Amino acid sequence: MVERVKTGVPGLDEILNGGIPRRNVVLLSGGPGTGKTILALQFLWSGLQLGEPGIYVALEEHPVQVRVNMRGFGWDTRQFEQEGKFAVIDAFTGGIGEAAKREKYVVKETDSVEELIDVLRTAIREVNAQRVVVDSVSTLYLLKPSIARNVVLQLKKVLSGMGTTSLLVSQVSVTERGFGGPGVEHAADGIIRLDLDEVDGELVRSIIIWKMRGTSHSMKRHVMEITDKGIVVHPDKVLKTRRYVLMQE
């Protein structure tokens, strides 16, 4: 039997046949406005409700703003942080600013993958983290796409080796068919792709499980929504788009 981690996202566990296999490192890929960060934060919050400590690595946003964004959905992590069950790793500010000085876990050299991994390893151990989100992993290799696969493999070695189930948020452009860097799709155990398409003059959000090691899963593109309580996936609504067919012609 495959041990699974419930994502806590309504409808997503259903199309994953019960959840993400434990210890998998999953690439959560998509363009701007597709809901990647919301889904990742929802995954962490759901874990906290199930007694699974978590870590959010903030590479593109101030840790204070991350907490504000979570509270906007009713996900208040303050008590969990005080109890040592949740932590935000500040890999954004470089320790500059008054608010940054109050952060427990700070990556001083924000472009150093080695320092990030050292801080991450310490935080996982101290928090006893079972779920980790890195948002976004693309930031680590944006200027050097050729090292993308190596960066993901380094993270995977630590994240999976220490027993966590993880989401690596990966940025792609609106028209890009890939997943955010050369070869990263081979390094990850799973790929979840979020998209925003214009269908009959209306923008529609969708989700597709591109691959997931250790489990069968839906092969269809499902409609999803962002609500005031987070993301909802509709297993019974399939989006048909000619987007990729048109791009190949």
Image (cartoon, rainbow, N blue to C red):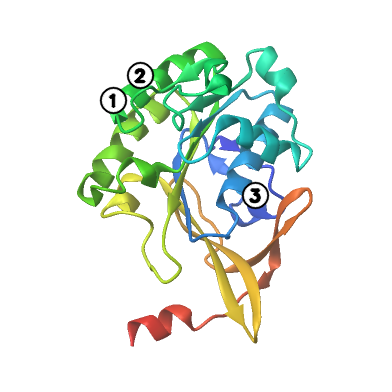
Q: Can see residue 102?
A: yes
Quadrant where the N terminus is found in the figure: top right
Q: Which image quadrant is residue 67 in?
A: top right
Quadrant where the C terminus is found in the figure: bottom left
Q: Can see residue 6?
A: no
Dot 3 lies on which element?
Answer: helix
Q: Is residue 240 left or right of residue 79?
A: left
Residue 114 numbered tag: 1
N-terminal label among 3 and 2:
3
Residue in the image at 64% along x and 87% along y: 200
Dot 2 lies on which element?
Answer: helix
Q: Which residue has dot 2 on it? A: 118
Q: Nearer the viewer, residue 26 or 108?
A: 108
> The residue under label 2 is which amino acid type?
Asp
> The residue under label 1 is which amino acid type?
Glu
Report how far apart the C-alphas of labels 3 and 1 lie in the structure.
Answer: 33 Å
Residue in the image at 22% along x and 44% along y: 147
Q: Which residue has dot 3 on it? A: 13
N-terminal label among 3 and 1:
3
- Name above or below for residue 49 compared with residue 235: above
Measured as percent of width and height from the top left, residue 104 is found at 53, 15
Residue in the image at 45% along x and 37% along y: 59
> The residue under label 3 is which amino acid type?
Asp
Q: Is residue 127 left or right of residue 12?
A: left
Measured as percent of width and height from the top left, residue 38 is found at 63, 47
The mark lying in front, picked from 3 and 1, is: 1
Measured as percent of width and height from the top left, residue 144 is found at 23, 47
Disc 2 crowd, CA 10 A, few/some/many (<14, 14-19, 20+): few
